[in-house]
Image: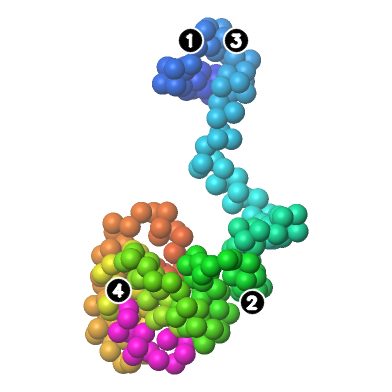
Amino acid sequence: MHWLILTIALQVACVVHVFRSGRNTAWIMAIAFLPMIGILAYFIVEILPNLSRDRRVSRVRENIADSIDPERRVRDAKALVEFSDTIANRLDYGDALMARERYGEALQQFRTAERMSPHADRAVGMRIAEAAYEAGQAGDAIKALDALPETGSQSERDRRDVLRAKVAEIDGRPRDALAIYRNVVARVPGDEVRCRIASLLIAEGDRAGARTVLKEVEMRMKHTPAVTLKADAPMYDWAKRTLAELG
């Protein structure tokens, strides 16, 4: 009985797919009169090839592959550099190392890419600044930020300022960091800046101020896409836990 219900459900799903996707209606006869053979043939011929081009499916497949073999992208990127030592391949290699939190090694790749570039490149320079910050090299991060070419993009300026604030945090200058965060918080997407402001306020003893900021984060979470909440789960968990502790 269960097998019959499953077969009928699959038949209906395939027929609906035929009509919605504009496939040849001859498939309907095969699906109706040769249920399992028709369904299997339709899946292999019409559905499976398109799955390989679906970005969502590709992303899931990539995530599964990364969970099984976390160093796969690093190896692939390194192999590309060895095959063709270009700026783009060096940057991809550095990005793969950053994803694995191998910041010192990533910094080396970005610096190599910088030396290979015939002119100052904003993308390369920003990568150097970010890798230096993550590696705990505050001075090098500031030098890289100061050397970046001017930009007319407000979002790019805000991105640089957020990194300056992060560097100020690890450099023992919380007030400088707080001032920068407050200046950009309304323009920067997401809630990382708000959470960092709250953390700095708590460190300064301003629990009421921190609570106000975290209440805003809590309110914004109700309208934040689930995929974002999942991606930044540790940060949002911290925000909820800290807000509860502040009372």
Q: Which residue is mark 1?
A: 25
Residue at the spot of label 4: 184
Q: Which residue type carries mark 3?
A: Leu
Marks 4 and 2: CB-CB under 8 Å?
no
At mark 3, the secondary structure is loop
- Label 1, secondary structure: give it: loop
Inter-mark Cα distance, 2 to 1: 58 Å
How far across and how far down the image is residue 197, in percent?
33, 80
The local secondary structure at tag 2 comes to helix
Q: Camera-side residue: 209 or 58?
A: 58
Q: To which quarter of the image does residue 188 belong?
A: bottom left
Residues at badges 4 and 1 in contact (C-beta under 8 Å)? no
- Residue at 28%, 86% in the rendered image: 207
Foreground: disc 4 or disc 1 = 4
Residue 5 visible (yes or no): no
Q: Main secondary structure of the magenta part?
A: helix
Q: Amino acid at mark 1?
A: Thr
52 in the magenta segment: no
Density class for disc 3 (Cα within 10 Å; few <14, some 14-19, many ≥20) is few
Crowd band around label 4 with a 10 angstrom C-alpha radius: few (<14), some (14–19), many (20+)? some
**Which residue is pictured at 66% across the width and 58% down the height?**
86
User: Mark 3 sits on what residue?
Assistant: 34
Q: Which residue is mark 2?
A: 104
| 223 in relation to 122, above or below | above
**What's the amino acid at mark 2?**
Gly
- Picture quadrant of residue 102: bottom right
Work out whether mark 3 precedes mark 4 in sequence or the reverse, and give the earlier one.
3
Residue 70 position within the rendered picture, expressed as x and y whole percent measured from the top left: 67, 59
- Numbered disc in front, either 3 or 4: 4
